[in-house]
Image (cartoon, helix red, strand yellow):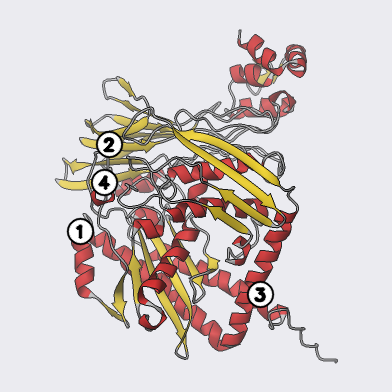
Amino acid sequence: MTPLAAATPGPTGVDPITAEIIRAGFVSITEEMKTNLMRTAYNLIIYEAQDFTVGLFDPEGRPISIGLGLPMFMGGLSDAIKAKLAFYGPDGIKPGDILLTNDAYIVGSHLNHMIFTLPVFHDGELVAFASSMAHWIDVGGVLGGTTTDIYAEGLQVPIVKIFKEGVQDDELTRLIATNVRFPDLAMGDLRAQVAAIRTGETRLRAMLVRYGVEAVKASIADLFRRGEELARRAVARIPDGTYEAEAFMDDDGVNPGRRIPVRVRVLVRGDTFTVDLSDMSPQVAGYFNSGATAGRSAAQVAFKCLTSPLEAPINEGSLRPLEVILPPGTVVSATKPAAMRWWMTYPMTVVDCVFRAMAGVLPDASIAGHHAELGMTHTYGVDQRTGRFFQFVGGPQGGGWGATARADGQNATICVNDGDTHNAPVEVLEVKYPMVTIDEYALRADSGGAGRHRGGLGTRLRVRLNTPAHVDTWIERTVCAPWGLAGGGDAAPNRVWIERADGERVEFANGKVTALGLAAGDSHVVELGGGGGFGAAHQRPVEEVLADVRAGYVSVGAARTAYGVAVVGNRDDGFDVDHAATEALRGSCIHDPQRCVQSVTD
């Protein structure tokens, strides 16, 4: 038998088979890190909602492999590692050190995000970093009220060594535990994050021993090279040009009704893709600001989706063709002491606007607007039955995603900012938080934008209090509805209201509620919007409209007014189509879609 010939080394000096095995190994390592964090964390928002991300990085802090999680955390992890390197210098970081920060202006987000970073050494050489970023449920700060600077929002941890050469710093640990409301949960999550990055260190060191440090380094270089080549080829296929889109946010939580502009400009030149965020609103007085890391991350998320969405792992190379123009002092590049508590909302609409800007030249890669909200609520008080203080964080809640040129939008899906995060099962919530009862979690009929492809449906979450409490909400996009593309209709926007136990309904001018008192038996209700439609609604096949009506996605009335389909009842499966009436309705639509909608509405 003739022995197999050795594989020919690639451009980076490593044979392609070894490079592929190591690439898959990076993905496996970050998946194991993610699993270990989920299994050992104490807070529901980590182990159920999965509000965290883990990753491996090269000695300069560039991403090698990001574990699937929150897309917006891509830049946060990398920028935090680079800041830690700059602070300590390469010689100031020792084996066994674990570096910690939640600096909002480094991380780009709120103080709840703790980033732990472990240097990985091999034969005395710093070869990589393992890092984890996770949401702690409480970091102190004011309850209720509207924060207008970072000092009101909780404990700020500068760049520190929580472990020094393998020994945990007891004084720093006690300082952190003293400044949070639930120290047992916080310390549990600290241990879980440390366990996750130690898992990454262990697995990566085993890889270095097995394949050798030079092969691993060469494989990383090959990974970056391949990612860059794929992304540049994708950009080169886009016609050169300048593409623009804009939207707006309701307000900043301090000045009700004062719209916040969101404007993006995309410049494509050859194989370079530039996202210009110079015309974004200046940072605002309220708590919706985010740091420059979040602004850049929003551009990265949109770019990755448009160019190489399925290429894994997410790494430095796949982002090299992207340039971001982002001056300081905007709502996505805020400077200290801007409030950052609800950092995530505005960057999501930046992502939506990049897709909107590129829809004309990348119709098969773009997506109509989505609900762009987490639907989070914050209910807190003293449980009268136990006498203990509690905080219940409702959400993340699913909404509708926009339709595409190929398919309907997804129903009840978490917003783009949070990627792989999940809503917690109702049963788990009620066991962990017996002070609330979830009376309803349902799809919103007619919330998806009409189109040849229908937008996804939003959801309604109704939470009843079993004890007196206060509630805060920070819901956005209650006015700026998720938009359709290529003639598709807009979706229903987000909204929130209160239902008193006596039946009174309390509504609000926007989606922001601050320290509102609720009695036992009162409920807060959040309805997240749908996704925009794609293409003309009268082109949607009649049988698909009928199926939507039967499923409860579209009402009989909306089938007529939005789609030009006359649905009537029958004895068998409840609904059928009046084909003669539908032909008349759709005949009007073909010649004048707007007149058709008006006529059937009348």
Q: Residue 119 is drawn in which quadrant? A: bottom left
Residue 242 screen position, x and y as percent? 66, 44
Question: In terms of sequence position, does the residue under pointer 4 or pointer 3 come before the other?
Answer: 3
Given this view, does label 2 or label 3 mark the residue nearer the observer? 3
Q: Quadrant of the C terminus?
A: top right
| Numbered disc 2: secondary structure | strand
User: Is 330 placed left or right of 160 in the picture?
Assistant: right
Question: In terms of sequence position, does the residue under pointer 1 or pointer 2 come before the other?
Answer: 1
For residue 222, which numbered disc appears in the image? 3
In the rendered structure, are the residues bearing label 1 and label 2 in contact, judged by CB atoms less than 8 Å apart? no
Label 4 is placed on what type of residue?
Gln
Q: Which residue in the structure is indicated by mark 4?
A: 391
Residues under labels 1 and 4: Cα distance? 16 Å
Question: In terms of sequence position, does the residue under pointer 3 or pointer 1 come before the other?
Answer: 1
Given this view, does label 1 or label 2 mark the residue nearer the observer? 1
Which residue is pictured at 32% across the width and 82% down the height?
166
Which residue is pictured at 26% across the width and 46% down the height?
391
In the rendered structure, are the residues bearing label 1 and label 4 in contact, judged by CB atoms less than 8 Å apart? no
Q: Which residue in the structure is indicated by mark 1?
A: 179
For residue 471, which numbered disc appears in the image? 2
Question: In terms of sequence position, does the residue under pointer 2 or pointer 3 come before the other?
Answer: 3
Query: Could you tell me if residue 528 is visible in this image?
Result: no
Label 2 is placed on what type of residue?
Val
Residues under labels 4 and 3: Cα distance? 47 Å
In the rendered image, the residue lying farthest to the right is: 1
